[in-house]
Image: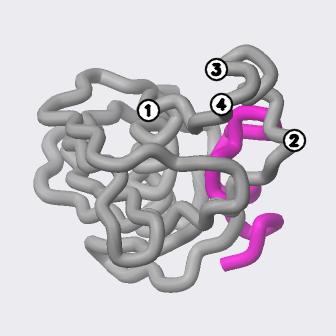
Amino acid sequence: MTLEQIKELLPHREPFLFVDQVTKIDKNTVEAFRDIQPDEYFFAGHFPGFPVLPGVLMVEAIAQVGILIVLNRLGGRGSKKTLFARIDQARFKRQVNPGDRLLLRAEVVGSKAGVYKIRGTARVGEELACEATVVGALRD
């Protein structure tokens, strides 16, 4: 899935779109990546001189790839918006720096009445950088 195809599903746009490309998507899982560039806007204020990707942005990236599964199932977003309902069990294991490729994987582990529970990870190479369970709601 290219960036343009991702934009057809997700309502997010730069600078808050955190998925560059989807490499695999099926009914319950998705794999994608985001290349972390040295000129990202958040590095100017997040530890100037020691740039580190904010952990909350890794959780946002996990949520974005996870909701892609749901929107892909529905055949597009239509008028639907996705909103965070909850973040659980977020763990940060490795810092992410400019030049890193953030490998994202998410799986839908539950759903009920337009609310989706998604478990995901963000890795740099084989190293786990972040893992989290997020709950998102689709709303008109």
Where residue 85 appears, x then y in whole percent? 29, 22
CA distance for labels 4 and 2: 13 Å
Three-letter residue code for mark 1 = Gly
Contact check, label 4 and label 2, Cβ < 8 Å: no
Contact check, label 1 and label 3, Cβ < 8 Å: no
Q: Is residue 77 left or right of residue 69?
A: right
In the foreground, 68 or 121: 121
Q: Earlier in the sequence, mark 1 or mark 2?
A: 2
Q: Residue at x 53, y 61 (%)?
A: 102
Foreground label between 1 and 3? 3
**Crowd around label 4: few <14 · some 14–19 · many ≥20 (10 Å):** few
Report which residue position mark 3 lands on.
Answer: 47
**Crowd around label 2: few <14 · some 14–19 · many ≥20 (10 Å):** few
In the foreground, 99 or 72: 99
* Secondary structure of the residue carrying numbered label 4: loop
Q: Start and end of the magenta stretch?
A: 1-19
Report which residue position mark 4 lands on.
Answer: 50
Report which residue position mark 1 lands on.
Answer: 55
Contact check, label 3 and label 4, Cβ < 8 Å: yes
Report which residue position mark 2 lands on.
Answer: 39
